[in-house]
Amino acid sequence: MRQSMTLIPTLREVPADADVKSHQLLLRAGFIRQNASGVYSYLPLARRVLVKIEAIVREEMDKAGAVELLMPALQQADLWQESGRWYSYGPELMRLKDRNEREFALGATHEEVITSLVRDEVKSYKRLPLTLYQIQTKFRDEKRPRFGLLRGREFIMKDAYSFHSSKESLDDVYERIFTAYSNIFARCGLNYRAVIADSGAMGGKDTHEFMVLSDIGEDTIAYSDTSSYAANIEMAPVKASYEKSGEAERGLEKVRTENQKTIAEVSSFLNVNETQCIKSLLFKIDGRPVLVLVRGDHEVNDIKLKNLFEASTVELAEAYETKNILGCEVGSVGPIGVKNVEIVADHAVESIVNGICGANVEDFHYVNVNPGRDFEPSRYEDLRFIKEGDPSPDGQGNILFAKGIEVGHVFKLGTRYSEAMDALYLDENGKSQPMIMGCYGIGVSRTLAAIAEQFNDDKGFVWPEAVSPYQVHLIAVNTKDEAQSSLSETLYKSLGEKFEVLFDDRQERPGVKFADSDLIGLPVRVTVGKKAADGIVEVKVRKTGEVLEVQTDKLKETISSILGF
Ligand SMILES: O=C(C[C@@H]1CCCCN1)Cn1cnc2cc(Cl)c(F)cc2c1=O
Ligand SMILES: [Mg+2]
C-alpha cells in the first residue's frame, strides 16, 4: 500500500483526553478516531489489525469444532421479555422503537437470539452438541466509557454459544474452547492468565476470565506465588485459619470515643490493633437490611455476599438508612443488642477475643467484646476479600495481586436460558429435556487495545508480527533523487511479492517519515537513501532498534529471518 493513497493521520502531540498509552498511541498513530464518547472509527491500520486478530480467532474456534454464523444486532424486545432480561437490565441495554412502534434492543449479547434460533431448528439429541459463534458489533451504554477501545459503547465481540444433552458434553466443549482461547491470546503475543471468575448475573457455576496482565487493568487477580492458582479477587475464596488468643475474656465495657469513627481512628484512639476491631456495615440485600461483620483490617466482598444470599442486588445502606434502622451514625454501628436485623460475620470475627465494636450510640464503643458471649451472628461465612499474603486457596504458596484487562470470559450456563425460553430436545428415551448451554466471549476490539497497551515503547507501537498492520515499512528518503525513487519503486514491487509492504512515498521531510514509522511500529523498516545507487539499503528492526546495511539481492532473506519465517 502506498502511504500517499491511504489514510494514516498521525499526530505530533499527545491528545488531551487520552489517559492510557494505548489510547494515546492509537490516536497519534492514526489507527482510530472518536465519533462519540465510547464510539470509534477503525481507520485502515486498525482495520488490518482487527482482520488479523479475527483470523486467529476463527482459526482456533473452527479447530475447537465451533461453526460461524452471523446474528442481527437488532433484537426483538419479546425475546428479552421471555428471558426476563428486558426488565432486569437498565440503561446499559440500548433500546429503540421501529416505525411501527415495536420495541427492539441493540445487541449487547446474544443468548436470547441464539436460544430462540436453536429451539426452532434443533429438536433431537442426535443434533447435539452444537457450538455456534459470531464476530459482531455489540452495544452497551456504559456509564463511563474510557481508555479508548478498552471500554467502548460499541465494540467488536466474538461470542459463542454451545448446546448439549449432557454435562459431560458441556465440560468437553468448555475445555476445547478454553484451549482455543489460550492459543488465541498466546498467538497475539499477550501475557495473559486464565482466572477462576464469578459468573455475575449469568448464573451457572464454572466460569473463567482471560486476563491480560496490565497496570491499567480494572480487574484485580489474586494469584499464588508458587502454584498456577489464579482467581478474580471478586470470587477468590479465603482459606485462612485464625487462631483464637488464649487470653481470658474480660468484662464488656462501654467507653467514650468522642468523634472516633473509622476503624483507624478507633483502633489508634484505644491503642489496639485493627485486627482487634469488628467492622460492622449495614447492607441492603435485595432491599432487606443485613448487618455484615468483618475483622477491622478486612474488606467486605459484596460479590460473595450476593452469591451467599443468591441476591440480585447488594448495596451498602445509605447513612440515613443506617440511622433509621440501627439508631446511630455509620461510625458507631455494632452487633451488640441488635434485634431486628440479621447479622452475618466473616470467619475471622469468630476468633476475636476482647475485641472492639461500635455501641450503636454516638461517640461510644464497646471494649472486651467476645463473639458468642456478647452477640451471636446468624452465621459465620467467607465474606471478605482475599488479601496479599493470605494462603493460596489451593494450599500452595501465598497470594499476590496483579491488575488485569478482561479480554475473554467463558461460562457453563446450564439450562437457565433453555428453560426460560423452552429450548427443548427429545432425549434418547423420547423425553423432552432443556438443552444444557455454555457461552464464550472474546472482546476483539478490546484485545486490539490490550496488544497496543502491551507492545509499545517511547517512540510508538512495536506490533508483534502476527497482528501487525503490515510487515515492512519501505521508506524513500528523497523521492526527488532519481536513484532513490527508482530503487524504492522496484523494491515496492519485488518485496510486495513476499511481504505486506507499506510504502512511504509521500513528499515529506525524512525526519517526519522516520518519526511516523517509529510511531506506527511495523516490525521491519527498509530505508532507501544515499547508497541506493550502490544497491545498498538500510534495514531497521523495530523491536530491537538494530540497524543493518543490506545489499538489495539479500534483502528478502534478511527480512524473512527478522520476521521469523
Ligand atoms: O455477555 C455476557 C455473558 C456472555 C459473555 C460471553 C459471550 C456471550 N455473553 C454478560 N453480560 C455482560 N454485560 C451485559 C450488558 C448488557 Cl446491557 C446486557 F443486556 C447483557 C449483558 C450480559 O449478558
Ligand atoms: Mg467478566
Image: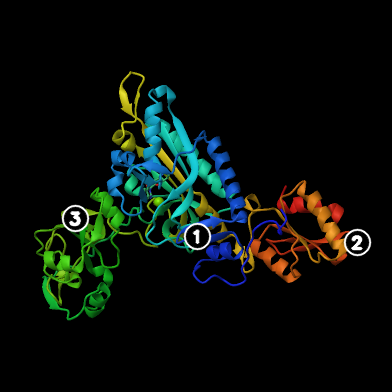
Of helix, strand and loop, which one carries label 3?
loop
Residue 135 in view, yes or no: yes
Farthest residue, direction top: 429
Whether label 1 lies within 8 Å of ligand 1 gets the answer no
Farthest residue, direction right: 534
Is disc 3 in contact with disc 2, using a CB cutoff of under 8 Å? no
> Which amino acid is tagged 1?
Asn
Q: Is residue 269 above or below residue 544?
A: below
In the picture provided, is 33 more to the left or to the right than 90?
right
- Picture mark count: 3
- Mark nearer the viewer, 3 or 1: 1
> Which of these two is toward me, 139 or 241?
139
Percent position of residue 469, x then y: 64, 53
> Which amino acid is tagged 3?
Gly
| Label 3, residues with CA under 10 Å away: few <14, some 14-19, many ≥20 | few
Percent position of residue 355, x then y: 19, 69
| Label 2, residues with CA under 10 Å away: few <14, some 14-19, many ≥20 | few
Which numbered circle lies on residue 534?
Answer: 2
Of helix, strand and loop, which one carries label 2?
helix
In the picture provided, is 396 more to the left or to the right than 257?
right
| Mark 1 or mark 2, earlier in chain | 1
The residue that mark 1 highlights is: 35
The residue that mark 3 highlights is: 287
Whether label 2 lies within 8 Å of ligand 1 gets the answer no
> Which of these two is toward me, 375 or 420?
420
